[in-house]
């Protein structure tokens, strides 16, 4: 098998209509197709955003959670649903490690009150 | 362009290069339909240029390659290609139909072509594209090196190793056939060890 023999094989041609498709005026100016391809997803996104943020519509109903969180970042900690959970409790998070048995000091940092005396 | 009746400068270029670019697309790992899509993108972009670039043939090969690589990266197209590869396992003749069928070719020539395309398809893409550019696009190793951003020696090495692998593969096939029915195929005896720069 020689290089010349390989070269003698003619590569498969593209479909017959492709040339006309490429060289026709409709394909050369694909502005409408491009515009539609960009605008359609953007329209859907805007529509979904409006749906999400205008739930209810009378202005008196409670705001959706996402809208509330986005409007006030300090609400983000409460977005998980169970309000002031263990992670938000200062004493248990900060001083919990001092109460473990590996801590050698006899003095505990968690405030304890003895009401017996 | 078409409505004025004038021939656009890229029309003769399309006639000269379309089939070779489709083959190059196959060498880059695209299916035939995907290669046609990339060809269309490339020539639509070229058709919007009022004047031809300095080296139109090289420009369109480079443009086709860049678009083909971008095309391959898209997730959905990658999945579709994997599906096509799976389908090719059942429809091998259609999937590896890289060359035109000649009506006067003999059964042995047809078998050789199919085996060669199979061996070509199994090469790494780096070797495959160098072989296609060298043989069917008529590029020199200098030009291939410039296109792929490698040295001409690297391009020549990929070409040589790729052809050697095809030769080894075909010799294996011929050996199997000789074992089966005792008919040796003489054309493989003259397979070259390498190419010229």
Image (spheres, coloured by chain):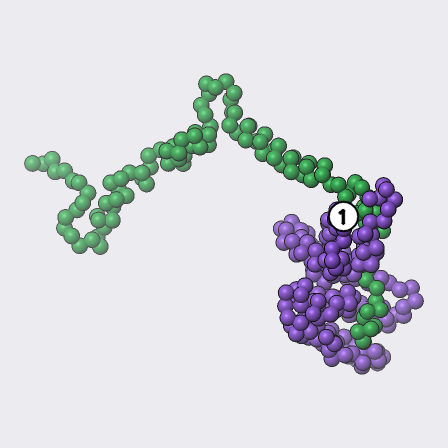
Chain colours: A green, B purple
**Residue A15 shows in the view:** no
* Label 1: how many Cα within 10 Å (few below 14, some 14–19, many 20+): few
State the count of labels. 1
Label 1's element? Answer: loop
Q: Position of residue A12 (x, y in %)?
A: 82, 60
Q: Which residue is mark 1?
A: B50
**Residue B143 shows in the view:** yes
Q: Position of residue B78 (x, y in %)?
A: 65, 53
Q: Nearer the viewer, residue B103 or A108?
A: B103
Residue drawn where x is 77% and y is 79% of the image: B192
Residue drawn where x is 70% and y is 61% of the image: B28
Task: Residue at the far left: name it.
Answer: A117
Task: Judge from the rendering whether residue A53 lies leftward or rightward of residue A96; answer left or right.
Answer: right
Quadrant of the snapshot with the C terminus of chain B: bottom right
Residue drawn where x is 31% and y is 38% of the image: A88
Residue drawn where x is 78% and y is 67% of the image: B138
Task: Judge from the rendering whether residue B26 lies leftward or rightward of residue B12; answer left or right.
Answer: left
Q: Position of residue B73 (x, y in %)?
A: 63, 54
* Figure check: B169 above or below B17: below
Q: Position of residue B35 (x, y in %)?
A: 74, 55
């Amino acid at each position: 098998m020689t290089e010349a023999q390989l070269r003698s094989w003619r590569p498969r041609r593209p479909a017959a209509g492709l040339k006309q498709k490429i060289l026709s005026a409709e394909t050369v100016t694909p502005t409408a197709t491009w515009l539609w391809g960009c605008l359609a997803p953007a329209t859907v996104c805007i529509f979904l955003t409006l749906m999400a943020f205008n739930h209810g519509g009378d202005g008196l109903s409670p705001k959706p959670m996402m809208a509330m969180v986005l409007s006030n970042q300090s609400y983000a900690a409460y977005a998980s649903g169970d309000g002031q959970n263990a992670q938000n409790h200062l004493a248990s998070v900060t001083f919990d490690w001092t109460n473990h048995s590996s801590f050698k000091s006899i003095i505990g940092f968690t405030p304890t009150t003895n009401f017996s005396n | 362009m078409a409505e004025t009746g004038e021939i656009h400068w890229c029309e003769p270029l399309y006639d000269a290069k379309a089939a070779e670019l489709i083959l190059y697309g196959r060498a880059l790992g695209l299916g035939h339909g995907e290669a046609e899509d990339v060809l269309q993108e490339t020539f639509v972009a070229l058709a919007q240029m009022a004047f031809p670039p300095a080296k139109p043939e090289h420009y369109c090969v480079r443009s086709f390659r860049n678009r083909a690589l971008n095309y391959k990266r898209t997730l959905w197209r990658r999945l579709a290609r994997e599906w096509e590869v799976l389908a090719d396992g059942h429809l091998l003749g259609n999937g590896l139909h890289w060359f035109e069928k000649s009506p006067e070719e003999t059964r042995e020539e047809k078998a050789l072509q199919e085996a060669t395309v199979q061996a070509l398809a199994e090469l790494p893409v780096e070797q495959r594209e160098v072989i296609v550019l060298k043989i069917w696009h008529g590029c020199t190793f200098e030009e291939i090196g410039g296109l792929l951003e490698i040295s001409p020696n690297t391009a020549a090495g990929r070409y040589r190793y790729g052809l050697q692998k095809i030769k080894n593969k075909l010799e294996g096939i011929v050996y199997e056939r000789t074992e089966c029915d005792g008919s040796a195929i003489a054309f493989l005896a003259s397979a070259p060890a390498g190419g010229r720069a």
